Image: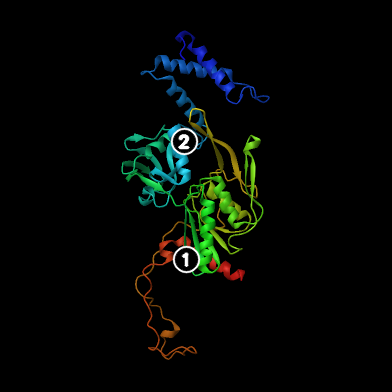
Amino acid sequence: MRFPRLLYGLTALTLLGLLLVNTQGVIAQQTAGEDVPLEELRGFAEVYERIQRNYVESVDDETLVRNAIRGMLERLDPHSAYLDASEYQQLQEGTRGEFGGLGLEVGTRDGFVEVIAPIDGTPADAAGIQPGDLIIRLDDQSVKGLGLQEAVSQMRGDPGTEITLSILREGEDTPREITLERAVIQVDSVRTRMLEPGFGYLRISQFQSRTGEDVLEALSDLNEESGGLEGLVLDLRNNPGGVLDAAVDVSDAFLSTGEIVSTRGRLERASSRFTATPNDALNGAPLVVLVNAGSASAAEIVAGALQDHRRAVIMGEQTFGKGSVQTIMPLRSGNAVKLTTARYYTPDGRSIQADGIAPDVEIANVTVSERDGRDTRTRESDLPGHLQREGRPEDGEGPEATDVPASSLASQDFALAEALNLLKGLSILGR
């Protein structure tokens, strides 16, 4: 519907008012002291009319309204956003674990796109992109002023196509350019292996709708393979989060009683408590959880719940600190609103937001290497005429000593090696 330009200022204000009244009776439901800001609405209508009349190029009404909605949401916090139908579909694909793009979980900082974490096994992960990297350009376009969802949409695309990211990394004076080829991102959120007999490793790269079920199946397989686990390392490093229900299910796999997480918002329906159900899938075996600065949101819920219940030792670095709840609200148009509606709290009542989870045992992000060659240090067995241990064959009769392996767990992943050592100690003490 269009109206004469002379009436446009009044018309825009009237239409906006009608929209507000029609959206779940917002005006009618105003609580005491929350009057509708008519002056601000008049100001909005005036700016709208000035753009329509004076902007250098003609802009259609739909674009102006859509941009106004985007700006209104994106200035609230880094996670609220307006999603058009395509972006809404992309979000749904991400929670199912398959989508086209680079494999990055991102947020915003200082007007730029910040990497929360690369997803395991994706082009971004293979290219060495790290948590905390700032993406300042996409191809030849600056991301300054771009909405987060618009930036995400540009990074996604047809598999096989390329995009160049200009990245600013802490400690580096000049941006680095990284060209990535988009791929179909199929995320297997749960991976397992045995570290040593009796000691398992379970990695969760992202919390998807099926992650809770997958974790229970993986633990069952590890228990069967080991004849009963003596301990487990749960790796949540560079896990950007995901579905709340999946985080609750994973926490519940290791807890038998008590609160897992609570949410608190302005509205009663935004506040809730999630509690554990009986049965610990590890039967009380020791648990060490690895986290770092790329562990966010749902990963922090799990770490916080297990830490507060003294069920696990949290090891690594301070986590990211995303402790807010985003609710997806579909609109009649087929678009949607992603709106922050509550904050997460750990069982002890700690807010995760902007603080994160502090590890019980800090492990710096370091790399170690083994010495080359054999161990040349002198031991008792090297001394001439040393006494033999009872039952040990004379020198030369036993098997020859072997070289030190070229690599070990410590040189491959120092934090994981330390977690395994701690786990073995906890297992010994618990016997």
Residue drawn 54% across and 47% down? 298
Q: Residues within 10 Å of mark 1 (few under 14, many from 20)?
A: some
- Disc 2 residue type (three-letter): Tyr
User: In the image as oriented, which residue stretches furthest toward the right?
Assistant: 32
- The mark closer to the camera, 1 or 2, is 2
Give the numbered dot on residue 88: 2
Tell me if 202 is positioned left or right of 136 in this view: right
Q: Secondary structure at mark 1?
A: strand
Residue drawn 38% across and 71% down? 405
Tell me if 158 is positioned left or right of 225 in this view: left
| Location of residue 90 in the rendering, given as x and y in whole percent from the top left corner | 44, 39
Residue drawn 60% across and 52% down? 305
Q: Quadrant of residue 134?
A: top left
Q: Where, quadrant-wise, is the C terminus in this rendering? A: bottom right
Q: CA distance from mark 1 to mark 2?
A: 40 Å
- Disc 1 residue type (three-letter): Leu
The mark nearer the N terminus, 1 or 2, is: 2
Residue drawn 40% across and 15% down? 54
Asked if residue 122 can be seen in this view, the reply is yes
Disc 1 + disc 2, Cβ < 8 Å: no
Give the numbered dot on residue 195: 1
